[in-house]
Amino acid sequence: ESATTVFFDGSCPLCRAEINIYKSCDAIGALRLVDVAAPGAELPEGLDREKAKARFHVLSHDQTLLSGSPAFAEVWKQLPGWRWAGHLATQPGINAALELGYRLFLLARPALVRIFLVAQRVIHTSRERVR
């Protein structure tokens, strides 16, 4: 059985932070991570770089291309400690709510990235002062 391939925007600090969480939980190597912002990133048929940077995509182990809420659910189902969330996320009403939330997040993503970067700088500056 092949790994689930996760396509993420490595140029997005929020996306990198999320992927780092997944990496830390993936002790069994269930996920293959592809930074679509990297030159030469291999993308499956039907997915170009701009689509992949604009929205979260996953190629499941059975080679089904998923995006948005179903893609997150697929990732979560692969990670120990997250499987319950993955299965819950596939339930019809919950899946629809997660997809709506994800679409709203995408609209707010540019502003959230700016806030995230400012927060990181504040934390870094505070840590430097403590030393």
Image: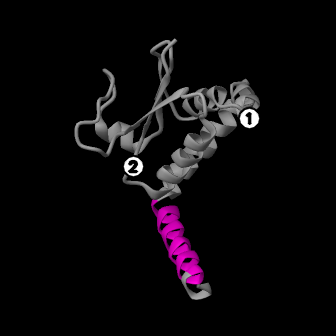
Question: In x, y percent, where is residue 100?
Answer: 61, 41
| The magenta stretch spans residue 115 | yes
Taking the view exactly as shown, the residue that stands out farthest to the left is 40
Closer to the camera in the image, 94 or 19: 19
Residue underneath mark 2: 10
The CA distance from mark 2 to mark 1 is 24 Å
Taking the view exactly as shown, the residue that stands out farthest to the bottom is 129
The answer to which quarter of the image holds residue 99 is top right
Q: Which residues are magenta?
A: 110-127
Closer to the camera in the image, 80 or 131: 131
Question: In x, y percent, where is residue 62?
Answer: 50, 12
Q: Residue at x 37, y 37 (%)?
A: 52
Q: Indicate left or right for 63 with 100 as reference.
A: left
The answer to which quarter of the image holds residue 69 is top right
Residue underneath mark 1: 81
Task: Identify the amino acid type marked 2.
Answer: Gly
